Amino acid sequence: VHVSAEVSPFHKSGGLGDVLAGLPGPLARAGVDVRIVTGLMGDTTKLDSIGGRSALTPWPHPVEIGLGGQPIRVQVHEARTHGGEVITYFIEAPHLSRGGLYGHDDDVYRFAILSKAAVAVASILTRGQGLGPVVAIHAHDWHAALAVYYARAQAPALRDAKTLFTIHNLAYQGLAPASESPYLDVRWDDFHGAFEYAGALNLMKGALVIADRITTVSPTYAREIQTAEYGNGLDGLLRALSGKLRGVANGIDVRRWNPATDPAIAADYSAVDPEGKALCTADLRWELGLAAPKTPAFSPLLGAVTRLTSQKGIDWLCDAADGFIRDGGQLVVLGEGDAQLEHRLHWLAMAHPGRVAFRRAFDEGLAHRIYAGADLFAMPSRFEPCGLTQLYAMRYGALPVARATGGLVDTIAPLINQYDVGGANGFLYEGHDGAAFSGALRWATHVFRDPGALAAMRGNAMRAQHSWDDRARAYVTLYRELGIHI
Ligand code: ADP
């Protein structure tokens, strides 16, 4: 039973949603009976892909939960999802379902409700006829952290179930004042034994301590989070727990992200027949009001699709943009978030009309058209647990220019020598500022202008194997390590 706040295409704010979209199907095909528990988040949850709300059926078992001594009325709706391979339980409850994923003052309480309900559902499944016991609770990110605790401490039916906790982003840990513990049914001895961090309640920390296995979304990030630079204050704990920590890189859903069949883009293309990509680039320029260059082979179009947070290094992108534009490049950024970064990007677009486009939105269709239209893809991330956008970019033949951190190191084969491309499919650079990114962009622009090197790298990128089927096997191995029979 996977527990997650985000499941794409129902509701997502980033890579977490994509993982819950991509991993369960291949797990099911590998022989795992996968169930998912997530919220029904009012209007935020989009059910069109399964035929709308009428595709949900009320779960026949009454689910009664309480939190902090208060009973909470929960309705569970069941649906076949992931092309029919998986059953998802959508939890509808006061507070949780008021609409919007995150950003409410009581998010910690809202997701405690989701976690409680998930454990209740798993307990009922275990006690049910015919299905056999639930063998593992697999919780994702801080929103589901309490599911690990409730399963271990408060659910006798799940006594034999293993618990796994996956860190998708250590920067968000789910913090609350210690005084909230009783409202979340965290007992004081467990607060002190697992959840306490600098006097406060830290939900992720509790799950890390309690879970049988911790995973994170790339091997390099698994190492990095054990260092002070990337550990967000939990590096010491993670070093102590390293024996149960594993890194498995994320994959992508190669059916949904396929330039040969993508209805959102202007022309179809593939590694063997890449011609349509030029049309997609021209179409993207037209859509965004970017000037058509006299010699397109001289003028790389650099794309970015991103949450605008300091994590993503968009300030470094802004620092590097002037030089890149002067060097003949064009830039498109799709993203929303931090107001200051939005402001800088607006100014950049105004300062370079026809050369820089900024769209402040969350727009799936435009995201696809940027991957398809871009020549290069910007990822100057300060840290990157795995990163999916570089994988989508590569699949669509846009070469990532990325800082050498986290999953970017594990998923990009960097160019070392322009005259001997080999298997290279992108650019990795070291450094902590806009100047370092600038240098990487200068090199990428130079290589872009070498048609032989560009074609070879593009082919490598589009053929790179990052499908979930391979990655799901790594999770099956992990489950087996815990003694689960699959
Ligand atoms: P993170 O989870 O840190 O945000 P990832 O690279 O793992 O980063 O995943 C980001 C996902 O969110 C990708 O699917 C990307 O296409 C999508 N995304 C991010 N911002 C936007 C946006 N503004 N519009 C559309 N999709 C977006």
Image (cartoon, helix red, strand yellow):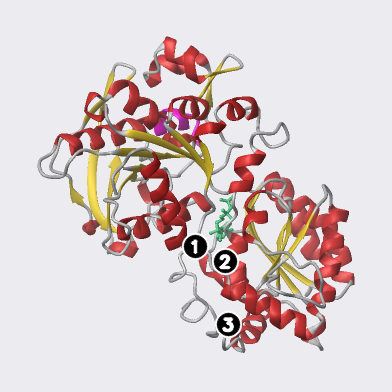
Residue type at numbered disc 2? Tyr
Q: Secondary structure at mark 2?
A: helix
The CA span between labels 2 and 3 is 14 Å
Q: State the image coordinates of residue 49 (x, y, percent, origin top left).
A: 34, 64
Q: Is residue 127 above or below residue 26?
A: above
Residue at x 54%, y 48% (from the top left corner): 217
According to the picture, the residue beneath numbered tag 1 turns out to be: 252
Q: Is residue 97 rendered to the left or right of residue 418?
A: left
Q: Quadrant of residue 311?
A: top right
Verify CB contact (< 8 Å) between mark 2 and mark 1.
Answer: yes
Front in this rendered view, residue 470 or 295: 470
Q: Please report the bounds of the magenta region as a residue range.
A: 103-111
According to the picture, the residue beneath numbered tag 3 turns out to be: 271
Q: Residues within 10 Å of mark 1 (few under 14, many from 20)?
A: many
Q: Is residue 243 above or below residue 296?
A: above
Is the residue at mark 2 in contact range of ligand 1, meaning its CB lies under 8 Å from it? yes
The CA span between labels 2 and 1 is 8 Å
Residue type at numbered disc 1? Ile
Q: Secondary structure at mark 1?
A: loop
Q: Residues within 10 Å of mark 3 (few under 14, many from 20)?
A: some
Q: Earlier in the sequence, mark 1 or mark 3?
A: 1
Q: Secondary structure at mark 3?
A: loop
Residue type at numbered disc 3? Ala
According to the picture, the residue beneath numbered tag 2 turns out to be: 392
